[in-house]
Image (cartoon, helix red, strand yellow):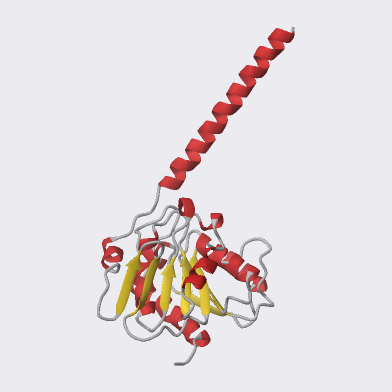
Amino acid sequence: MPATAGRRAVRAAGVLLALAVIVAGGFLWWTAQVMAPMPQALAAMQSGDDVVVESSRWLVFRPQAGTPRAGLVLYPGAKVDPRAYAPPARAIAAAGYVVVVVPMPLHLAVLAPARASDVQDAFPDVQRWAIGGHSLGGAMAARHAARTPLRVHGLLLWAAYPAGRDDLSAAGLASTSIFGTRDGLVSRAEIEASRAQLPAGTQWIEIEGGNHAQFGWYGQQPRDLPATISREQQQREVVTASIALLDAIAVDR
């Protein structure tokens, strides 16, 4: 009997190990299915007369001349190549701000929500910072803002809302929530429910006809609804509202 029980225990352990390998392999396969940047996004990765673009540890977009009036740390959505946010990042930088798009481990911001602190430390000349992100990236940006209120002056949510018990209702920061009426991944009810977790002065920007994927440049996204406006139009509205937030926290020079 003891020998039989031992063999059963070994078999059970083998089954559990096999299941663990399968689950881990499945997770790694899932995270490897990254939504790639469109050609327009890759074109925006080139420096020009108005914006300098650097890509090493992070994707950095900054105005060609002068000291940035403020900075924006931007967290990508889950499983989205960070380069897909190059067009809006570049447009915001052209308005006089440094924008840093932060790659995430396994393309999931939930695995490194505090990376904004490293960015801030690397740019000591930038005195005021907003943190933001798209979808899961926005939720993790809100988490970081809630945990480091003295270092964050603005919160920018693109199709996102604070997760769980992350409460910024008493935070002394400017905040803007931008969402589309055709978003198939983040519902209006979820956005509305987040009002209690954000400062009373939050700006709520509804993009009529906008969807989830058009906050970036990575094509279509599973479960999203078709937008009824062009990607270019949605991007213009996103960039305008984002610059307005940065204008509100900027240092005059």
| Residue 17 visible, this angle | yes
Q: Is residue 231 above or below residue 219?
A: below
Across and down, in percent, residue 13 comes to 63, 23
Q: Residue at x 38, y 70 (%)?
A: 60
Q: Quadrant of residue 93?
A: bottom left
Q: Position of residue 149 (x, y in %)?
A: 63, 74
Q: Position of residue 231 (x, y in %)?
A: 34, 69
Residue 242's place in the image compared with 112, above or below, is below
Q: Is residue 121 left or right of residue 64?
A: right
- Tell me which residue sits at (31%, 77%) in the image: 51
Most foreground residue, 83 or 220: 83
Residue that appears at 71% across and 12% down? 5
Query: Relative to residue 198, is residue 109 drawn left or right?
Result: left
> Residue 87 falls in which quadrant of the image?
bottom left
Q: Quadrant of the C terminus?
A: bottom left
Using residue 133 as the reference point, say whether residue 94 is left or right of it.
Answer: left
Q: Is residue 241 above or below residue 184?
A: below
Residue sitting nearer the eye, 27 or 115:
115
Residue 68 percent coordinates (x, y): 42, 83
Residue, far right? 1
Depth order, front residue of 198/192:
198
